[in-house]
């Protein structure tokens, strides 16, 4: 065995390494511009600072959340010189809770920021601009969120239960007694939830809580140990007081305490009821979701004799309204349980011109049996990593029109490059303000074959 070499010191190429900035350090900064995620950008001593809660032109005191090489992440602690655009934060937890990072911007400025983010990605990555910009789809800036996950953690050292939302830039939990973006039916549940959970006998065995408001109100508790009869009684009494269903998630899938209870949401313009279970993907903003589906159908312009493909179909949010307008809808989803649920939703709404399939949509579509007959139009609503493998084969399906709903402008722009290469033109694009008070951008784009 070779002897270990001792006493040697190696210096990184390029000179000595700069000392890392410690977490918690405060620094006075001048903010030069906004990043695509809404954070302020400052430059100091060769480092780039990304500062939550800061606006262009402001002078602020920022607290370091983390540093990696020459990039420093921080949050605004104090504003010495405020931008004319700054408004008082509407939420008492602003600056600590990590949920609503741009609430210090007026809503119209938030929309303008998101529009710039989408336009910049399409221009820089894909080198294109739509022939027409659609106005933003938006709704109320508060009271819109119908689903929320509440963090729950037992602090053994302090012997207390922490209940709230994750802090900005850390895993800390900020105690929340009121959340302005939650829909009104969930507000009283949110405010009384911590006190109820603290009464349970094994707080260290509690996981997260999910709240949902749709055709019914539901409270789901994740627990890592069996609940006692007394604890179950406390939970049931709490839900009965708030006229909410109680769902429990121990081993296996989430289950309602009362198996006869149904949970779901309505798509009112189409008189549709979609069943839902905690853990399923569902858009959190009901109003913007309905406006999004309406706009997608208008842009896609489906005809009565057409066969239409819906990729990443989920519970049938687009597929079922489409099925009311066309000869046949083929809907595809990667998660088998969601495929089954979507098929059940179609049957329960008396829609029999839909076919649902499970497929790995991160892979090419060329061998899929359901793709062989071709389609007049395609709608896709992929996750954040986009649909690159899918769009590579779309032209071979014969589709003349394509509506792409995106939750990540970067991957939409990347996939646009491929669609343009296949001969599609970007006819129209616009943002969907699904998450007001955040920098999260959803978008819709219409492509047509040349």
Image: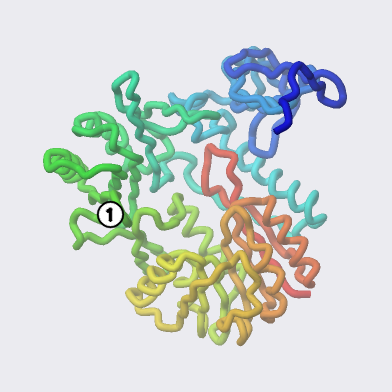
| Residue 172 on image: x %, y % | 45, 27
Quadrant of image for the C terminus? bottom right
| Residue 294 on image: x %, y % | 52, 64
Q: Residue at x 65, y 31 (%)?
A: 39
In the image: residue 84, left or right of residue 201: right
Relative to 313, is 42 above or below? above
Indicate the quadrant where residue 238 lies.
top left
Res 90 seen here? no
Display coloring: rainbow
Number of residue marks: 1
Q: Residue furthest front?
A: 1
Q: Nearer the viewer, residue 443 or 256?
A: 256
Res 207 seen here? yes
Q: Secondary structure at mark 1?
A: loop
In the image: residue 14, left or right of residue 293: right
Q: Nearer the viewer, residue 188 or 192?
A: 192
| Residue 259 on image: x %, y % | 20, 60
Relative to 229, is 245 above or below? below
């Amino acid at each position: 065995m070779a002897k270990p070499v001792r006493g040697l010191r190696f210096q990184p190429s390029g000179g000595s390494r700069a000392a890392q900035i410690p977490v918690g350090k405060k620094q006075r900064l001048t903010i030069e511009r906004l990043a695509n995620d809404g954070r302020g950008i400052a430059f100091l001593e060769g480092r780039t600072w990304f500062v939550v809660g800061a606006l262009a032109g402001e002078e602020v005191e920022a607290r370091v959340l983390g540093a990696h090489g020459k990039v420093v992440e921080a949050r605004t602690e104090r504003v010495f010189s405020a931008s004319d655009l700054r408004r008082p934060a509407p939420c008492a937890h602003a600056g600590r809770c990590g949920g609503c990072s741009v609430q210090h911007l007026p809503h119209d400025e938030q929309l303008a920021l998101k529009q710039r983010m989408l336009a910049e990605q399409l221009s820089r990555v894909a080198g294109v601009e739509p022939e027409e910009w659609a106005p933003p789809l938006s709704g109320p800036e508060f009271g819109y969120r119908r689903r929320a996950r509440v963090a729950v953690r037992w602090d053994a050292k302090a012997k207390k239960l922490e209940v709230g939302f994750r802090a900005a830039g850390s895993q800390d939990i900020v105690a929340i007694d009121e959340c302005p973006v939650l829909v009104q039916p969930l507000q009283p549940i949110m405010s009384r939830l911590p006190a109820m959970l603290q009464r349970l006998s094994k707080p260290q065995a509690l996981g997260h809580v999910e709240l949902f408001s749709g055709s019914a109100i539901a409270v789901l508790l994740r627990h890592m140990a069996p609940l006692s009869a007394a604890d179950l009684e406390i939970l049931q009494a709490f839900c009965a007081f708030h006229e909410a269903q109680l769902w429990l998630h121990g081993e296996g899938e989430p289950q309602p305490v009362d198996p006869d209870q149904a949970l779901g949401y309505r798509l009112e313009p189409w008189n549709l009821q979609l069943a839902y279970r905690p853990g399923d993907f569902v858009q959190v903003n009901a109003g913007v979701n309905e406006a999004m589906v309406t706009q997608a159908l208008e842009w896609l312009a489906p005809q009565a004799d057409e066969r239409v493909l819906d990729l990443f179909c989920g519970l049938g949010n687009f597929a079922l309204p489409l099925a009311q307008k066309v000869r046949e809808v083929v809907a595809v989803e990667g998660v088998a349980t969601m495929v089954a649920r979507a098929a059940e939703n179609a049957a329960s709404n008396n829609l029999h011109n839909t076919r649902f399939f499970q497929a790995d949509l991160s892979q090419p579509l060329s061998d899929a049996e359901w793709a062989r007959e071709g389609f007049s139009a395609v709608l896709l609503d992929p996750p954040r990593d986009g649909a690159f493998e899918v769009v590579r084969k779309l032209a071979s399906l014969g589709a003349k029109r394509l509506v792409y709903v995106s939750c990540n402008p970067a991957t939409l722009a990347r996939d646009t490059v491929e669609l343009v290469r296949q001969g599609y033109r970007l006819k129209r694009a616009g943002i969907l303000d699904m998450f007001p008070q955040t920098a999260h951008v959803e978008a819709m784009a219409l492509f047509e074959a040349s």
